Amino acid sequence: MTVRYQRQKGTADILPGEAEQWQYVESVARKIFAKYRYSEIRTPLFENYEVFSRSSGDTSDIVTKEMYDFQDKGGRHIALRPEGTAGVVRAYVENKLYGPEYADPYKVYYMGPMFRYERPQSGRMREFHQIGVEAFGVDTPMLDVETIAMAQELLSTLGLKHLKYVINTLGDAETRAAYHAALVNYLTPYKDELSEDSQVRLAKNPLRILDSKDEHDQAIVANAPSILDFLTPAAQKHFDEVKSQLTALGIAYEVDANMVRGLDYYNHTIFEIMSDSEAFGGKWTTILAGGRYNGLVKELGGPEMPGVGFGMGVERLLLIMNAEGIMPKTTMPLAAYVVGIGTEAHQAVLPLVQAVRKAGFAADCDFMDRKPKAQFKAANREHAVLVITIGEDELVQHAAQVKVMATGEQSQVSFDELTNHFADVYQRLTKGDN
Ligand code: ATP
Ligand code: MG
C-alpha cells in the first residue's frame, strides 16, 4: 500500500470490537456526570487560533509546538482544538450562559477528539480523545472538591485501582507575583545550565520550568522555593479548605508544590490523577488533570467568572483498563438468528427477522442463500441466543422451530405467537438484561 492511503502518524482507527469499549467508558461517564448535574456541550473541532493561544498562553507547549493550525481559504488563522476548555469557555461567553436564568454553578461536560502535533508514542497521539468537565460561576473550594470527587467516582466505577491524587495550589494573582519574583531570583544563577526551553521560559514564564521534563532542569528545580510559602491568607484559606474537605470525603491526596499545569490561566487548586499501571511500565502517568481557572472567562471577553474543570485522556485510560483486565466484555448480543431452508422458506426469512427486530430484539439472517449448515455456523459465530428455523413444512404449518442454543431445547411456535413466545424465552434466558 502506498503511504498516501495509510493513516496519519499518531492517529488511530477505532474498529468494531474496540469501539464498544469506548461506548462503555462514555456511557459510564455520562451517567455519573448526570448525577452531579452536568449537561453535555458540543463545541466545534476547530476555532480561531487566538481562542487557544489566548487560553493556553503563548509560552505553553501546546501553543509553541503542538498546535495543528492553518490558514483557511478565506485567510483565517484556524486551529484544530488541542484541548476542550478553551472552546467551552468561548461558547460560554458567546452564548452568555452566565445570566440569572442559568444555574450556578453552570456545569457542562464534553467528550471528543483533540489534536496536538506531538511525537507519537504509546499514550501520546496526534489525534486523541478527552472526556472533560467545566463548572462556572462559583469560587468556593467546595466546588473544587466536588470536581475531584466526581473524577474519583468515575475512575473507581471504571475499576481503576492504585491511583495517586496529587494536588497543589497556584494561589491568586498576588501569590503568583510574589512567587514569580522569588523563583526568578533562585533560577537566574543557573540560567546557563537550564535547558534551552527553560532559558526561554525564565524570561517569559518561569513557573513552567517547574514542569520541565528535562532531568537537569528537574534537579535544579528540586531546591527551588515553594509556592506554598508565598500564599496570601485568602489563597491559604482556599487551599486549606480543599484539603480538609478532601479528607472529609475520604479522598487521600499528596501535595506536590512543584506541580504546575499546562495552561496559564490556572489559579488556586490544580490536581492530577496518576496511575502506575503496567500499561506504562509502572511509571507514574497522568490520566486526568484539571484545576481552577478564574481568569479565563474574562480573558476570552466575558465577565469576571470563575471556573473549574478537568480533562481525562481516553486512550491512556483504555490502555490501563485493558492492561489491568478490568474492561468488561463488550459484545453486541444477538437475540435471534433466523435460518431459512429451501428457496421458498428463504423468502419468508426477512419478514420474520423484521418482526423480531420490531419487537425490540437484535436479529440477523443469511443473505446469500447458503446451505442450512452454513447458516447454523453463522448463528454460532455470532453467539445467537435463539435460532429460529423455517423450512417447507413450517411454511405450510405457519410455524417455526425455535431452538435455545445454550441447551439445545427446541419447540414449534406458530408465526402469530412467535414474537411473544420469543420475548418470553429470551427474557427468561437473559434474565431480562436485554
Ligand atoms: P503531558 O504532560 O503528558 O504532555 P499534558 O499536560 O499535555 O500531559 P493535558 O493537556 O493536561 O496533558 O491533558 C489532559 C490529559 O489528556 C492528559 O493527562 C492525558 O491523559 C491526555 N493527553 C494529553 N496529550 C495527549 C496525547 N498527545 N495523546 C493522548 N493523550 C493525551
Ligand atoms: Mg503535553
Image (tube, helix red, strand yellow):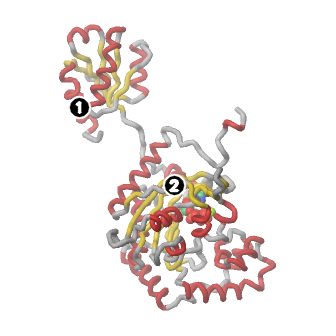
Q: Earlier in the sequence, mark 2 or mark 1?
A: 2
Q: CA distance from mark 2 to mark 1?
A: 43 Å
Image height of 230 relative to 134, above or below? below
Q: Amino acid at mark 1?
A: Ala
Could you tell me if residue 276 is visible in this image? no
Q: Considering the image in quadrants, where does the C terminus appear? A: top left
Q: Nearer the viewer, residue 174 or 254?
A: 174
Q: Position of residue 429 (x, y in %)?
A: 26, 34
**Is residue 362 positioned above or below 100 on the image?**
above
**In this rendering, does residue 418 appear at all?**
yes
Image quadrant in which the N terminus is located: top right
Quarter of the rendering containing residue 56 = bottom right
Which x, y percent locates residue 298? Answer: 51, 75
The residue tagged 2 is 44
Q: As drawn, is 295 to the left or to the right of 37?
A: right
- Residue under label 1, please give it: 423
Q: Secondary structure at mark 1?
A: helix
